[in-house]
Amino acid sequence: MKAVFETRWAKIGETEEHYGGIRSAVVGGVDDAKEFARKHLVPYFADKCDAEEFCIVTLDTKHRPIRIVRITRGTLDASLVHPREVFRAAIADCASAMFLAHNHPSGDPTPSPVDRDVTRRLKEVAAIVGIRILDHLIVGDTVCSMAEHGCF
């Protein structure tokens, strides 16, 4: 099964040393998720300013990060996100919860109507498979929490 996901994780890495100690973090709420994103995702997305990328951070039962998984790389202003791809990685990690994250190359982290639709659809699937989505973060010049924008 590992070979299926290798290309998706290649840039971010698969081991604890690639993550800079993410397992010691606890993502209990919006502020924790935003802080995690500032520390671990902003530097990653900084090199991705030419295209949108959609990632998930899978979490164990104590809401400690298991892994950062790049799901898709899109175009300048769009990224195709299908629930099958998102939940394949979360199920493989035996995740109890996760949060979603993607970048806006424009720098404006305001959620778009498409961002809201994708989040709604993924939350519907999450309820069915039993993996809770804590938040959807958009990384631009700042980090925007869709939970804070009333999308949860």
Image (cartoon, grey):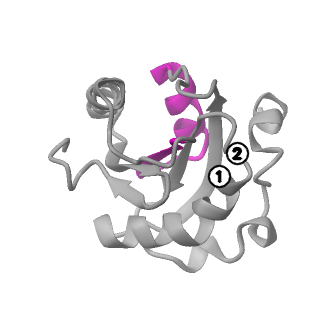
Relative height, residue 142 to residue 103 (above, below): below
Q: Is residue 130 left or right of residue 53?
A: left
Q: Position of residue 20 (x, y in %)?
A: 71, 75
- Name the residue located 79 percent from the left edge and 62 percent from the top edge: 15
Q: CA distance from mark 1 to mark 2?
A: 5 Å
Answer yes or no: is residue 112 visible: yes
Q: Residues within 10 Å of mark 2 (few under 14, many from 20)?
A: some
Instruction: Using residue 106 as the reference point, say whether residue 68 is left or right of it.
Output: right
Mark 1 surroundings: few (<14), some (14-19) or many (≥20) residues within 10 A:
many
Q: Magenta span has 84?
A: yes
Note whether residue 29 is visible.
Answer: no
In this view of the protein, which residue sits in the foreground, 91 or 58?
58
User: Is label 2 in a helix, a strand or a loop?
Assistant: loop
Task: Name which quarter of the figure residue 120 lies in.
Answer: top left
Q: Quadrant of the N terminus?
A: top right
Q: Which residues are magenta?
A: 82-104
Q: Which residue is mark 1?
A: 45
Depth check, front residue: 32 or 62: 32
Residue drawn at x 37%, y 42% is: 131
- The residue that appears at 23% across and 51% down in the rendered structure is 147
Q: Quadrant of residue 72?
A: top right
Identify the image quadrant of the C terminus: top left
Q: Position of residue 141 (x, y in %)?
A: 49, 58
Contact check, label 1 and label 2, Cβ < 8 Å: yes
Disc 2 residue type?
Lys
Depth check: 6 or 74 in front? 74
**Amino acid residing under circle 1:** Phe
State yes or no: residue 125 in magenta: no
Residue 73 pos. (x, y %):
67, 30
**Which label was assigned to residue 48?**
2
